[in-house]
Image (tube, helix red, strand yellow):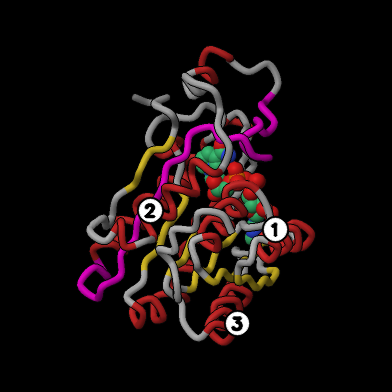
Amino acid sequence: MGEAMNRFDGKVALVTGAAAGIGRATAERLANEGCSVYIVDVARDGLEETVKLISEAGGSVEFATCDVSDEGEVKATVKACVDRFGQLDVLCNIAGILLLERFEKIPVEKFRRVLEVNLVGTFMLCQAALPHLIESGGNIVNTSSTSALSGMPYGAAYGTSKGGVSALTRTLAVEFGKQGVRCNAINPGSIKTAMGSGGNLPEDPDMQLVMRAMPIDKARGPEVIASVIAMLASADGAHINGEEIRVDGGTLS
Ligand SMILES: NC(=O)c1ccc[n+]([C@@H]2O[C@H](COP(=O)([O-])OP(=O)(O)OC[C@H]3O[C@@H](n4cnc5c(N)ncnc54)[C@H](O)[C@@H]3O)[C@@H](O)[C@H]2O)c1
């Protein structure tokens, strides 16, 4: 298992969106540091691949399919995680979807769907996990985005959902801080994953606008986000609460 730091020995994390990208990299990172990880996603094949990667490295992992926008599935998933591992110390809300479309052309159903997955999904996971996190003195790391900090052209639905995630994060931090539960978020810039490789820009986009959010340096892989999530979720982040950390190589600086 390489140079494990084992900041998560004896801990249990629930990671959503772990079939690919940032979710997979985070599950691998936590497991590599001694965490038992319960990983969920809608994509079963990808989950099985993540399980293989973690098991082969000697990590402790269990998986289940779960659509984070379905309240019944979310509640069942949190229960199954605690039944399996006996506790829950860390919740990483990483599942998400991107929609790039000109504002005037976004159908309201698509706007709602992005909010349902990115924002309502995060809300429901937090709500279902909180009793267990209060018990363990655990914490939450949510996935916002630089689109919550700076206008993202063609990203009205996505940016709105991430702005909601940032506000929800601060709310939970103050509402549950006294009970020993921290809640933080990360704001990734453009990261090399399926989502980060562009999505589908609308036809004939204004590239000058699009370029505002382009990395000033080389685009990086999901491990640069996973390492910051791990810091926030570990004792190294013990006094960080209600914070969001921009991880974009300085793009918005
Ligand atoms: N890649 C980037 O550039 C970037 C930048 C900022 C923020 N983010 C955020 O990081 C998170 C992870 O993105 P990524 O880049 O790894 O993308 P990704 O597309 O590689 O991974 C997203 C995962 O979420 C899963 N998912 C989608 N809808 C789901 C649902 N309803 N229920 C459960 N799982 C679902 C997908 O199956 C996929 O495995 C997202 O919240 C995204 O908004 C990504």
User: For residue 98, which numbered disc appears in the image?
Assistant: none
- Tell me which corner region of the image, top left, top right, bottom left or bottom right, holds residue 236: bottom left
Judge whether residue 178 is colored magenta: yes
Image side of residue 251 versus residue 19, left or right: left
Question: Could you say which is closer to the camera, residue 155 or residue 149?
Answer: 149
Residue type at numbered disc 2: Met
Residue type at numbered disc 1: Leu
**Mark positioned earlier in the residue sequence (3 or 1):** 1
Crowdedness of circle 3 by 10 Å Cα count: few (<14), some, many (20+)?
some
User: In the rendered view of the protein, which quadrant contains the C terminus?
Assistant: top left
Find residue 174 and report its horizontal and vertical position in percent: 23, 63
Residue type at numbered disc 3: Ala
> What is the span of residues highlighted in magenta in the rendered image?
175-202
SS at mark 1? helix
The residue beneath circle 2 is 231
SS at mark 2? helix
User: For residue 80, which numbered disc appears in the image?
Assistant: 3
Residue 110 visible within the image: no
Judge whether residue 211 is colored magenta: no
